[in-house]
Amino acid sequence: FIKSLAGEKTILFSSHVLPEVEQLCEDITIIHNGKIRASGDIHEIHKKFRQGLVLKIGIGEKESIPDLAEFGK
């Protein structure tokens, strides 16, 4: 149903279930702690973050997540 409305309406879909996001969305925005960390076309985000590179980030209790948009540049 959501996919069928895509040509007629702008739909805001919020989810942590990435397979659903990939099936339903063309453009995505990743928000963490109220800040945009990455935004763009689903294929652009895949290209930037899924080229076989695995990035593990350890974040301590008093640290914040880095801006993911800076990775992959």
Image (cartoon, rainbow, N blue to C red):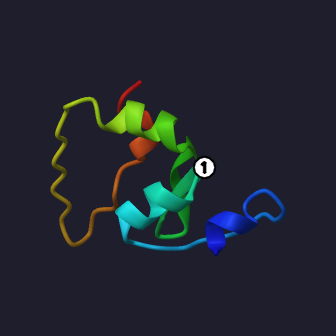
The reply, left or right, for residue 36 in relation to residue 66 is right
Image point (34%, 61%), residue name: 64
- In depth, the one of 5 and 30 nearer the eye is 5
Q: Judge left or right: residue 66 versus residue 38.
A: left
Q: Is residue 14 above or below residue 66?
A: below
Up/down of 26 relative to 21, above or below: above
Q: Residue furthest right?
A: 8
Q: Which amino acid, by three-letter code, is at mark 1?
A: Asp
Residue 71 point in image, percent of width and height:
36, 34
Q: Is residue 31 left or right of residue 26?
A: left
Q: Residue furthest top?
A: 73
Q: Residue at x 82, y 65 (%)?
A: 9
Q: Nearer the viewer, residue 4 or 44?
A: 4
Q: Nearer the viewer, residue 42 or 69?
A: 42
Residue 27 position, x and y percent, is 60, 49
* Mark 1 nearby-residue class (10 Å; few <14, some 14–19, many ≥20): some
Residue denoted by label 1: 27
Q: Quadrant of the N terminus?
A: bottom right
Question: Is residue 55 found left or right of 69 in the rendered image?
Answer: left
31 vs 71: above or below: below
Residue drawn at (84%, 62%), measured in percent from left and top?
Answer: 8
- Who is closer to the viewer here, 14 or 61? 14
Which corner quadrant holds the C terminus? Answer: top left
**Element type where label 1 sits in the image:** strand
| Residue 41 drawn at (x, y percent) | 58, 41
The number of numbered discs placed on residues in the rendered structure image is 1
Q: Is 38 placed above or below 24 here?
A: above
